[in-house]
Each structure stands twice: as C-alpha cells, then as structure tokens.
Amino acid sequence: MKNWKLSPTIENIAKYVECYWFLEKELHDQSFSYPKLNPDPSPHLIVANLDSTYGYTHSANTQNVRGSHWIFPHLKTFTMDHSAPFKIVGIKFKIGALYSLKMNNFSSKLDKIEMIDVNNHIGLRTFSPGQLLIRATEQKEQACNILDEALLPWLLDCHEDKHSHLVRQVMLLLGDTAIAEIGQKLHRSQRTIERSFVRVTGLSMKQVQSMIHLEEMLHYLYQLNKEEINWADVANKYGFSDQPHLIRHLKNSIGKTPANYVLHRDLAIDIYGDFEFE
C-alpha cells in the first residue's frame, strides 16, 4: 500500500484546495476491504482509471461509480468497497469551495457520490488521468505539478462575493470558537453569518463544527492504543458534557459506540493511516 499527501504551493490554488493525496492498494495488500469514511464537510474530487469501480454504502443505500468521481460533503458515514486493487488521486477542496466553483445546486448534492468526466469538468482536454496516476505512484512532486497545471485556469475563474469572503473569515474561527461568539468577533449579526454560511457551504455552522471536532478526535484516537484511551478525558478534551453525550455523538456520526469503535478500528484513518503531510 502506498499513500502520500501534499499541499499545493501556488496561492491561487491553495485558496480553494486543501491538499492533494494519493492512495494505492496493490494486489498483495491484506488491508481491510471495507473501510468506513467518516463525515466530512469538504468535497473531494477523485481521479481514477475508467475501468475501476467504487461503491459507497450507507444503511441499505449503495452508490456505485466507475472511474473519476466527486465525493460531496457528507453527514453520513460511508462504507467503501475497497476489496479490489485500486489507485486514486484525491483533490480535497476547502469547505465552501463548490460555491466559488459556481457548481449549480451543490447544496442538493449532500451525501452524494457523482461520476464525472474530469477533462470536461475542468475544461482541459489534454489532461490525462492515466498519466497522472502513473506519476503519482513514484513521482509525487511531478503529479502535483500536473494537477497545478490542470486546475489553475479553472480556479482562476472562481466566483468571489461578500458571502464567500465572510465564510472564509468564519472558517478561521470555527474550529476553536463557540458559534455564539463568532458574530461578536466579526462584528456581524448571528443571523447574517448563518445565512451566508448556509448559502456558501450548504451546511450549518453547527454541522461543520461538529465534523471538524470529530475529525480532530479521530486523529487523536488513532495515535492511542486501546489501553491508553480514557473516554472521560476524551469527552472533556473535545467539549462533551459527559461520556453519554460522547457516546451518542459517535453513535450518530460513525454508527458505533466508543467501545465498538475501539474493538473494530475500521475507519479509513485506521486502515490507511493519517496521510501526514510531507
């Protein structure tokens, strides 16, 4: 198994793209075949070979796609079918980027997986997903250069307005500031901020903050052995009123109680690692 994650270095790309990442499961890899993808407020554009199929399941609903596809922001945890070998490059966009990309009805795509033709999507006929995946295997810097070249003209045409500017300010605070205090810090009414936030992201500030904190907690738990985890300390560290509150939150977000999660360790981060930046 191979993986990497790199941040774009071009300012006009980094404004909208959080990172590029790569994941390859080879024939001899014995990793778990059905990892779970926890809720994420960021959209990911997955570049894949057209002959590869991918399944994303929540409850009894499975969304199957072939080749390149969008994973739109999702409140649900998906079970992914990674039973066959595969090779993918991911482009993780920043929260709210779909608004600036002028994607129609993006808020209706919550919890959706959507197959795309990457070349038509970004308006660059010379882009070759196959060549990108070959480069990504051994020459990650070259792969990132290919992505930079492909994305830059598209991202230079992004739309910015007062709503996107305000949401960018909100995102600087949302991770570690109580929602009720954000309006005061930005000298705006709470109603104005909420309205712009939903308009740009398709999500409420509470939903996004909850997913940000969940991601932070899962990264923290990933670093600990079962014996090292004190759930009372975890609840306190991440702002839960008590352990029952934490239990309900994990059950609602990833479908498991803390005890079941530690027993199975079947989220993507547990199977593939935390993709540390290089």
Image (cartoon, rainbow, N blue to C red):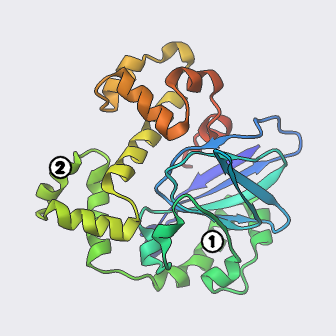
Q: Looking at the image, is 70 positioned above or below residue 228?
A: below
For the N terminus, give its image quadrant: top right
Residue at 43% over, 16% down: 230
Q: Which labelled disc corresponds to residue 180?
A: 2
Question: Where is residue 68 shown, x and y percent of the image?
Answer: 71, 67
> How many C-alpha atoms fall within 10 Å of the one at disc 1: few (<14), some, or many (≥20)?
some
Residue depicted at x 29% and y 51%: 174
- Front residue of 155/260: it is 260
Residue labelled with disc 1: 147
Give percent across and percent down for residue 240. Answer: 32, 30
Vertical order, 135 against 148 (above or below): above
Compared across the picture, whether 258 is left or right of 171 comes to right
- Mark 2 lies on a secondary structure that is helix
* Res 10 seen here: no
Give the camera-side residue of 165 and 56.
56
Residue at left offset 54%, top offset 82%: 154
Numbered circles on residues, count: 2
Q: Are marks 2 and 1 in contact (CB under 8 Å)?
A: no
Q: Earlier in the sequence, mark 2 or mark 1?
A: 1
